[in-house]
Image (tube, rainbow, N blue to C red):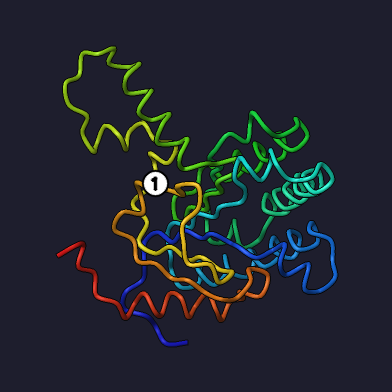
Amino acid sequence: MPKLDNIPTHVAIIPDGNRRWAKKKGLKPWEGHDAGAKNLERVLKANLDLGVKYITFWGSSLDNLRKRPLREKKALLDIYRKYFLKLTDSEDIHKHEVRVNVIGKWEDQFPESVKKVIHKCISRTNKYQKFFLNFLLAYSGDEEMVEATNRIIEKFKGKVKRITSRMIKEHLMTKDLPPVDLLIRTGGEPHNSAGFMMWDLRNAQLYFSPVLWPDFDEKKAREAIEDYSRRARRFGG
Protein backbone atom coordinates (compact mmCIF):
# COMPACT_ATOMS: atom_id res chain seq x y z
CA MET A 1 0.00 0.00 0.00
CA PRO A 2 1.72 3.24 -1.17
CA LYS A 3 2.13 5.95 1.46
CA LEU A 4 0.11 9.14 0.90
CA ASP A 5 1.84 12.49 1.31
CA ASN A 6 -1.08 14.63 2.42
CA ILE A 7 -3.22 12.95 5.08
CA PRO A 8 -6.06 15.00 6.63
CA THR A 9 -5.79 15.50 10.38
CA HIS A 10 -9.56 15.49 10.89
CA VAL A 11 -12.09 13.57 8.80
CA ALA A 12 -15.82 13.97 9.47
CA ILE A 13 -18.33 11.50 8.06
CA ILE A 14 -22.05 11.83 7.32
CA PRO A 15 -23.01 8.17 6.73
CA ASP A 16 -26.14 8.60 4.63
CA GLY A 17 -28.06 5.74 3.04
CA ASN A 18 -28.71 3.07 5.68
CA ARG A 19 -32.49 3.10 5.27
CA ARG A 20 -32.36 3.24 1.46
CA TRP A 21 -29.86 0.36 1.46
CA ALA A 22 -32.25 -1.71 3.58
CA LYS A 23 -35.25 -0.84 1.42
CA LYS A 24 -33.42 -1.90 -1.76
CA LYS A 25 -32.74 -5.27 -0.16
CA GLY A 26 -36.24 -5.73 1.22
CA LEU A 27 -35.01 -5.37 4.81
CA LYS A 28 -36.28 -3.41 7.82
CA PRO A 29 -34.79 0.08 8.37
CA TRP A 30 -32.95 -1.00 11.53
CA GLU A 31 -31.22 -3.76 9.57
CA GLY A 32 -29.72 -1.01 7.45
CA HIS A 33 -28.54 0.78 10.59
CA ASP A 34 -26.98 -2.45 11.84
CA ALA A 35 -25.16 -2.94 8.54
CA GLY A 36 -23.99 0.67 8.74
CA ALA A 37 -22.58 0.13 12.25
CA LYS A 38 -20.64 -2.91 11.06
CA ASN A 39 -19.30 -0.93 8.12
CA LEU A 40 -18.04 1.78 10.45
CA GLU A 41 -15.56 -0.73 11.86
CA ARG A 42 -14.08 -1.24 8.39
CA VAL A 43 -13.92 2.46 7.57
CA LEU A 44 -12.44 3.26 10.98
CA LYS A 45 -9.67 0.72 10.45
CA ALA A 46 -8.87 2.16 7.01
CA ASN A 47 -8.60 5.69 8.46
CA LEU A 48 -6.42 4.53 11.36
CA ASP A 49 -4.12 2.61 9.03
CA LEU A 50 -3.70 5.76 6.93
CA GLY A 51 -2.90 7.84 10.02
CA VAL A 52 -5.99 10.07 10.29
CA LYS A 53 -5.74 11.42 13.84
CA TYR A 54 -9.33 12.64 14.35
CA ILE A 55 -12.39 10.84 12.98
CA THR A 56 -15.83 12.30 13.68
CA PHE A 57 -18.88 10.22 12.83
CA TRP A 58 -22.44 11.56 12.83
CA GLY A 59 -24.41 8.74 14.42
CA SER A 60 -27.79 10.46 14.79
CA SER A 61 -29.47 13.83 14.68
CA LEU A 62 -32.07 15.02 17.15
CA ASP A 63 -34.70 14.49 14.44
CA ASN A 64 -33.56 10.88 14.01
CA LEU A 65 -34.60 10.26 17.60
CA ARG A 66 -37.66 12.50 17.75
CA LYS A 67 -39.36 11.68 14.46
CA ARG A 68 -38.50 8.06 13.62
CA PRO A 69 -41.04 5.32 14.43
CA LEU A 70 -40.72 3.97 17.97
CA ARG A 71 -39.62 0.50 16.86
CA GLU A 72 -36.87 1.93 14.68
CA LYS A 73 -35.73 4.23 17.48
CA LYS A 74 -35.55 1.31 19.93
CA ALA A 75 -33.59 -0.75 17.41
CA LEU A 76 -31.18 2.13 16.83
CA LEU A 77 -30.56 2.52 20.56
CA ASP A 78 -29.91 -1.21 20.86
CA ILE A 79 -27.37 -0.96 18.03
CA TYR A 80 -25.59 1.81 19.95
CA ARG A 81 -25.54 -0.34 23.08
CA LYS A 82 -24.07 -3.34 21.25
CA TYR A 83 -21.61 -1.26 19.23
CA PHE A 84 -20.18 0.64 22.21
CA LEU A 85 -19.86 -2.62 24.12
CA LYS A 86 -17.82 -3.96 21.24
CA LEU A 87 -15.73 -0.77 21.00
CA THR A 88 -14.90 -0.95 24.69
CA ASP A 89 -12.97 -4.20 24.23
CA SER A 90 -11.92 -3.68 20.60
CA GLU A 91 -8.38 -4.82 19.86
CA ASP A 92 -7.99 -2.10 17.20
CA ILE A 93 -9.11 0.64 19.62
CA HIS A 94 -6.57 -0.34 22.27
CA LYS A 95 -3.77 -1.25 19.85
CA HIS A 96 -4.03 2.13 18.11
CA GLU A 97 -4.65 3.97 21.41
CA VAL A 98 -7.90 5.55 20.25
CA ARG A 99 -9.77 7.82 22.61
CA VAL A 100 -13.55 7.59 22.18
CA ASN A 101 -15.61 10.73 22.71
CA VAL A 102 -19.38 11.25 22.36
CA ILE A 103 -20.85 14.68 21.63
CA GLY A 104 -24.46 15.84 21.51
CA LYS A 105 -27.61 15.58 23.60
CA TRP A 106 -27.44 11.83 23.92
CA GLU A 107 -27.54 11.95 27.72
CA ASP A 108 -30.92 13.70 27.53
CA GLN A 109 -32.28 11.30 24.93
CA PHE A 110 -30.87 7.84 25.70
CA PRO A 111 -32.03 5.35 28.35
CA GLU A 112 -29.76 4.60 31.30
CA SER A 113 -28.80 1.16 29.95
CA VAL A 114 -27.31 2.71 26.81
CA LYS A 115 -25.72 5.68 28.62
CA LYS A 116 -23.98 3.31 31.03
CA VAL A 117 -22.33 1.41 28.18
CA ILE A 118 -21.23 4.60 26.42
CA HIS A 119 -19.75 6.04 29.62
CA LYS A 120 -17.83 2.80 30.15
CA CYS A 121 -16.33 3.01 26.66
CA ILE A 122 -15.36 6.65 27.19
CA SER A 123 -13.78 5.82 30.55
CA ARG A 124 -11.83 2.83 29.23
CA THR A 125 -10.20 4.93 26.49
CA ASN A 126 -9.83 8.34 28.15
CA LYS A 127 -6.11 7.91 28.75
CA TYR A 128 -5.32 7.53 25.03
CA GLN A 129 -4.01 10.50 23.04
CA LYS A 130 -2.79 9.00 19.77
CA PHE A 131 -6.08 8.90 17.85
CA PHE A 132 -9.54 10.32 18.55
CA LEU A 133 -12.85 8.77 17.51
CA ASN A 134 -15.76 11.14 18.04
CA PHE A 135 -19.43 10.23 17.76
CA LEU A 136 -22.08 12.90 17.34
CA LEU A 137 -25.27 11.45 18.84
CA ALA A 138 -28.56 13.34 19.17
CA TYR A 139 -26.65 16.20 17.57
CA SER A 140 -27.81 19.22 15.59
CA GLY A 141 -25.35 21.77 14.23
CA ASP A 142 -28.09 24.41 14.14
CA GLU A 143 -28.78 23.98 17.84
CA GLU A 144 -25.06 23.83 18.58
CA MET A 145 -24.54 27.33 17.14
CA VAL A 146 -27.62 28.80 18.83
CA GLU A 147 -26.65 27.34 22.20
CA ALA A 148 -23.04 28.49 21.85
CA THR A 149 -24.27 32.04 21.27
CA ASN A 150 -26.60 31.85 24.26
CA ARG A 151 -23.79 30.51 26.46
CA ILE A 152 -21.63 33.48 25.48
CA ILE A 153 -24.47 35.90 26.34
CA GLU A 154 -25.04 34.18 29.66
CA LYS A 155 -21.34 34.02 30.55
CA PHE A 156 -20.56 37.65 29.85
CA LYS A 157 -23.99 39.05 30.82
CA GLY A 158 -23.86 41.89 28.30
CA LYS A 159 -20.33 42.95 29.23
CA VAL A 160 -18.79 41.87 25.92
CA LYS A 161 -19.03 44.29 23.00
CA ARG A 162 -17.71 42.01 20.30
CA ILE A 163 -17.94 38.25 19.83
CA THR A 164 -14.78 36.74 18.38
CA SER A 165 -14.13 33.53 16.46
CA ARG A 166 -12.24 32.18 19.45
CA MET A 167 -15.18 32.81 21.76
CA ILE A 168 -17.53 30.95 19.44
CA LYS A 169 -15.23 27.95 19.19
CA GLU A 170 -14.72 27.80 22.97
CA HIS A 171 -18.49 27.50 23.52
CA LEU A 172 -19.29 24.85 20.90
CA MET A 173 -19.99 21.21 21.76
CA THR A 174 -17.04 20.45 19.47
CA LYS A 175 -14.73 22.92 21.24
CA ASP A 176 -12.01 20.30 21.80
CA LEU A 177 -11.86 19.21 18.15
CA PRO A 178 -9.64 20.76 15.47
CA PRO A 179 -11.18 22.12 12.25
CA VAL A 180 -12.41 19.49 9.82
CA ASP A 181 -10.05 18.95 6.88
CA LEU A 182 -12.24 16.54 4.93
CA LEU A 183 -15.99 15.92 5.07
CA ILE A 184 -17.20 12.66 3.53
CA ARG A 185 -20.90 12.27 2.80
CA THR A 186 -22.19 9.02 1.32
CA GLY A 187 -25.56 8.26 -0.24
CA GLY A 188 -25.46 10.43 -3.36
CA GLU A 189 -26.97 13.62 -1.94
CA PRO A 190 -24.32 16.39 -2.09
CA HIS A 191 -25.43 18.74 0.66
CA ASN A 192 -25.04 19.40 4.36
CA SER A 193 -27.79 18.60 6.90
CA ALA A 194 -28.98 20.31 10.08
CA GLY A 195 -25.97 22.65 10.05
CA PHE A 196 -23.62 19.73 10.65
CA MET A 197 -20.43 21.09 12.27
CA MET A 198 -20.95 24.32 10.35
CA TRP A 199 -18.24 26.23 12.21
CA ASP A 200 -15.62 23.51 11.93
CA LEU A 201 -16.38 22.85 8.23
CA ARG A 202 -15.73 26.38 7.02
CA ASN A 203 -12.43 25.49 5.27
CA ALA A 204 -13.04 21.77 4.76
CA GLN A 205 -12.66 19.85 1.53
CA LEU A 206 -15.89 18.05 0.60
CA TYR A 207 -16.20 14.54 -0.79
CA PHE A 208 -19.58 13.24 -1.91
CA SER A 209 -20.00 9.59 -2.78
CA PRO A 210 -23.03 8.05 -4.55
CA VAL A 211 -22.44 4.83 -2.59
CA LEU A 212 -24.88 4.08 0.24
CA TRP A 213 -23.12 3.95 3.60
CA PRO A 214 -23.22 0.16 4.25
CA ASP A 215 -21.40 -0.34 0.93
CA PHE A 216 -18.82 2.42 1.49
CA ASP A 217 -16.05 0.00 2.43
CA GLU A 218 -12.34 0.29 3.20
CA LYS A 219 -11.47 0.74 -0.47
CA LYS A 220 -13.97 3.57 -0.88
CA ALA A 221 -12.69 5.22 2.30
CA ARG A 222 -9.13 5.10 1.01
CA GLU A 223 -10.24 6.56 -2.32
CA ALA A 224 -11.72 9.54 -0.46
CA ILE A 225 -8.45 10.14 1.40
CA GLU A 226 -6.46 9.73 -1.83
CA ASP A 227 -8.70 12.30 -3.51
CA TYR A 228 -8.05 14.72 -0.64
CA SER A 229 -4.29 14.13 -0.83
CA ARG A 230 -4.27 15.30 -4.47
CA ARG A 231 -6.06 18.56 -3.77
CA ALA A 232 -4.34 21.87 -3.11
CA ARG A 233 -5.54 23.74 0.01
CA ARG A 234 -6.14 27.44 -0.74
CA PHE A 235 -8.27 28.48 2.27
CA GLY A 236 -10.22 30.98 0.16
CA GLY A 237 -7.14 32.44 -1.52
Left or right of residue 178: residue 126: right
Q: Could you tell me the amino acid type at mark 1?
A: Leu
In front of the other: 126 or 194: 194
**Residue receiving disc 1:** 177
Left or right of residue 218: residue 32: right
Q: Residue at x 19, y 68 (%)?
A: 234
Check disc 1: other Cα within 10 Å, few if <14, some if 14-19, many if 20+.
some
Residue 223 position, x and y percent, is 48, 80
Mark 1: secondary structure: loop
Q: Quadrant of residue 130?
A: bottom left
Q: Quadrant of the C terminus?
A: bottom left
Left or right of residue 37: residue 168: left
Q: Residue at x 40, y 59 (%)?
A: 10
Task: State whether residue 162 is above or below residue 131.
Answer: above
In front of the other: 23 or 228: 23
Q: How many numbered circles does the render carry?
A: 1
Q: Residue at x 77, y 73 (%)?
A: 24
Residue 23 position, x and y percent, is 78, 68
Task: State whether residue 125 is above or below residue 93.
Answer: above
Q: Quadrant of residue 229?
A: bottom left
Left or right of residue 127: residue 229: left
Residue 114 position, x and y percent, is 74, 38
Residue 88 position, x and y percent, is 68, 49
